[in-house]
Image: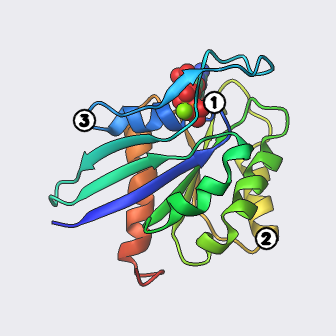
Amino acid sequence: MNEYKILFTGTMGAGKTTAIGSVSEAAPIVTDVANTDLSLGKERTTVGLDFGLLTLASGDRIRLFGTPGQQRFDFLWKILAKSAIGLIILVDNSRSDPLADLVVYLDGFAEDLSVLPCAIGIGRLDTHPVPTLEDYIDILANRNQLVPIMSVDVRRREDVVLLIDTLLAQLEANTFGA
Ligand SMILES: Nc1nc2c(ncn2[C@@H]2O[C@H](COP(=O)(O)OP(=O)(O)O)[C@@H](O)[C@H]2O)c(=O)[nH]1
Ligand SMILES: [Mg+2]
C-alpha cells in the first residue's frame, strides 16, 4: 500500500473545502473560522488547512490537503507542496478576473509545477460561461504549460475524482518520473 499526498489550491471560495469533502471517506478536518474580511461574502474561511483521506481500489491511500486561500498565507504553499505527488488548482469563474487568479497560482507554484503533475478545474462555468475553457487553454499555451484543464462542479464527487485521476494518470504515464 502506498500513500500519496495531493494538494488542492485556489482562491477563497474556489471550492477546496467542498472538493475535499466530496471525496473524503473520513469526515474532512477543516479549520474554517468565522470570516472577518467583510469584503468577502463568505461566513467561514479556511485559515489553516483542509485534510481528507481517500482509498483507491488498488488499496493505495491518498491524503488530500487544501491550502489556505488568502494570499497572505502563501508562505504555507511551499511547505504544503513538499512531498505532494500532484497539485490541483481550482478556479472560480464567477470572480472578477478568474484568468488572473489562475496565473497567481501558476506563478506561485511555478517551481513545484516543473516537477509535479497538475490538473486545473474551472468551477461555475455553467452560470458564468466567460471566460471560456479556450481562454484558459490560450493562457496555458502562451506560458508553454501543458496542464489538463476541465470544467468541474466540486460538489459532485465524480468531478473531483476525475481531477484526481487526471493527476494519477500523469504519474502512471511517467511524465514526471515520481
Ligand atoms: N453554484 C455553484 N456553487 C459552487 C460550485 N462549486 C462550488 N460551489 C460552492 O462554492 C462554495 C465553495 O466554498 P469552499 O469549498 O469553502 O471554498 P474554499 O474557500 O476554496 O475552501 C461552496 O459553498 C460550494 O457549494 C459550482 O460549480 N456551482
Ligand atoms: Mg476552504
Q: Is residue 95 left or right of residue 119?
A: right
**Quick check: can you spot residue 163?**
yes
Whichever of labels 1 and 3 marks the residue nearer the N terminus, that label is 1
Q: Which residue is mark 1?
A: 13
**151 or 27, nearer to the observer:** 27
Q: Position of residue 45 (x, y in %)?
A: 59, 26
Crowd class of label 3 (few under 14; some 14 to 19; many from 20; radius 10 Å):
few
Between circles 1 and 2, the one closer to the viewer is 1
> Which residue is depicted at the point 40% across and 73% down?
171
Secondary structure found at label 1: loop
For badge 3, the amino acid type reads: Ala
Question: Sequence-wise, which precedes: disc 2 or disc 3?
Answer: 3
Tag 3 residue: 26
The answer as to whether callout 1 falls within 8 Å of ligand 1 is yes
Disc 2 on helix, strand or loop? Answer: loop
Disc 2 versus disc 3: nearer the observer: 3
Residue 159, how many percent across, how many down?
A: 44, 40
Mark 3: secondary structure: loop
Q: Quadrant of residue 23?
A: top left
- From the image, which quarter does the C terminus lie in? bottom left
At 49% from the left and 67% from the top, the residue drawn is 82
Q: Nearer the viewer, residue 39 or 149?
A: 39
Residue 143's label in the rendered image is 2
Q: Residue at x 46, y 28 (%)?
A: 155
Disc 1 residue type (three-letter) = Gly
- On the image, the x and y values in percent for residue 165 come to 38, 57
